[in-house]
Image: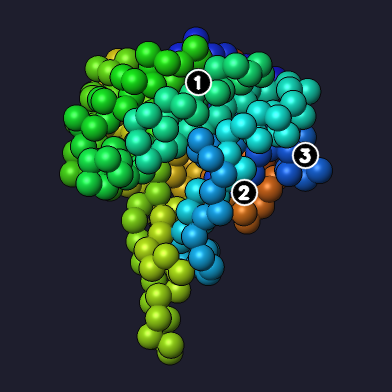
């Protein structure tokens, strides 16, 4: 079979398919549905310094081509993750990434310091789509200065590679990408969800308890692909593509524009087997095209 392995930030994956944070629990929940050892890796749901209950229901709403979610980053907190979740994940032959978030730079660093004491993780994915409560609630990932500040602090604290997950809710995503790179990020992942809303016309009420939520799924793929294409050309560090990836063809589009790996998110809700089917589809594509190593396709988009 073709070699699907890839590498970014010094991390080698058996294949480029990673399951995205917030769509795959802590990993173990999917162990009876798919063979986790077949994945290139998975990102656990976002971890905060203290446990969080999340937002009030309803939290999910299906859209015409995807879904809105406002889960509110519910999680058990980093310390319970380390004591209760991570030990059981070490048995899997795949890369495990911890997703980190906070409401202040100090909180991000606190979570990273806690994770530094553990074994079994391959890297930290940093969710900067969070408000900095000490700076008036400005979202880190929408401001280059705030992005640089939090990434620099995390990078100084982290003993593992730092992957910064970028928000699409900006005017120029390349400015944020460069700020993260300048602050020392080892890689970038993009995109996070687009901010959206839905209204029930019968009740005249928002369909989400939080009013607004994150839009994901096939509807956002063209936006995500465009942003990955731009960021790959704007920075020197590796990029991971995220957004509406449901098939091997979707994944290949991101690889062709230069992503080193991809994350599968919303598709996991529809079909837990989706990541495995994507891996199988990548093998079939390579065999059909006579490609020995998938990595030779990365960034091979033909432009005129």
Residue at image location 42% in from the left, 30% down from the top? 108
Of callouts 2 and 3, the N-terminal one: 3
Q: Which residue is mark 3?
A: 31
Q: Quadrant of residue 84?
A: top right
| Residue 65 visible to an observer of this rendering | no
- Between 249 and 110, the one lying in front of the other is 110
- Crowding near the residue tagged with mark 1, few <14, some 14–19, many ≥20 C-alpha atoms within 10 Å: some
| Residue at left offset 57%, top offset 14% | 12
Disc 2 from disc 1: Cα separation: 30 Å
Residue 93, position as x, y percentages in the image: 73, 21
- Earlier sequence position, callout 2 versus callout 1: 1
Between residues 25 and 11, which one lies in front from this camera angle? Answer: 25
Q: Is residue 186 left or right of residue 261?
A: left
- Labels 2, 3: front one: 3
Q: Which residue is mark 2?
A: 268
Q: Local crowd at mark 2 within 10 Å, few (<14), some, or many (≥20)?
A: some
Element type at mark 3? loop
Is the residue marked by circle 3 packed among few (<14), some (14-19), or many (20+) residues within 10 Å? few
Q: Which residue is mark 1?
A: 113
In the rendered structure, the answer to whether residue 213 lies left or right of residue 226 reads right
Looking at this view, name the residue that lies furthest to the bottom.
202
Q: Residue at x 54, y 48 (%)?
A: 52
Q: Is residue 280 above or below residue 163?
A: below
Using the rendered image of the protein, determine whether residue 105 is visible from the camera's viewpoint: yes
């Amino acid at each position: 079979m073709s070699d699907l392995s890839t590498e970014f930030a010094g991390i080698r994956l058996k294949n480029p398919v990673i399951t995205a944070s917030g769509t795959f629990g802590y990993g173990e929940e999917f162990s009876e549905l798919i063979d986790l050892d077949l994945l290139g890796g998975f990102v656990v749901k976002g971890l905060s310094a203290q446990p969080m209950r999340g937002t009030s229901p309803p939290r999910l709403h299906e859209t015409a081509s995807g879904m809105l979610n406002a889960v509110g980053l519910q999680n058990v907190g980093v310390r319970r993750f380390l004591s209760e979740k991570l030990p059981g994940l070490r048995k899997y032959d795949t890369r495990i990434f911890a997703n980190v978030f906070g409401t202040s730079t100090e909180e991000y660093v606190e979570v990273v310091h806690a994770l530094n004491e553990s074994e079994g993780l391959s890297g930290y994915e940093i969710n900067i789509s969070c408000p900095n409560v000490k700076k008036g609630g400005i979202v880190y990932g929408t401001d280059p200065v705030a992005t640089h500040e939090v990434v620099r602090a995390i990078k100084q604290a982290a003993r593992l590679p730092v992957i910064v997950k970028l928000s699409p809710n900006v005017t120029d995503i390349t400015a944020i990408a460069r700020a993260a790179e300048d602050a020392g990020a080892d890689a970038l992942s993009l995109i996070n969800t687009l901010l959206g809303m839905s209204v029930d016309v019968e009740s005249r009420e928002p369909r989400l308890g939080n009013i607004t939520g994150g839009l994901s799924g096939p509807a956002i793929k063209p936006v995500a692909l465009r942003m990955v294409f731009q960021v790959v050309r704007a920075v020197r560090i590796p990029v991971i593509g995220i957004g509406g990836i449901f098939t091997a063809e979707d994944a290949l589009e991101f690889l062709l524009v230069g992503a080193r790996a991809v994350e599968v998110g919303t598709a996991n809700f529809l079909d837990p087997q989706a990541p495995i089917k994507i891996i199988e589809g990548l093998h079939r594509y390579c065999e059909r095209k006579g490609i020995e190593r998938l990595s030779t396709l990365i960034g091979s988009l033909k432009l005129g």
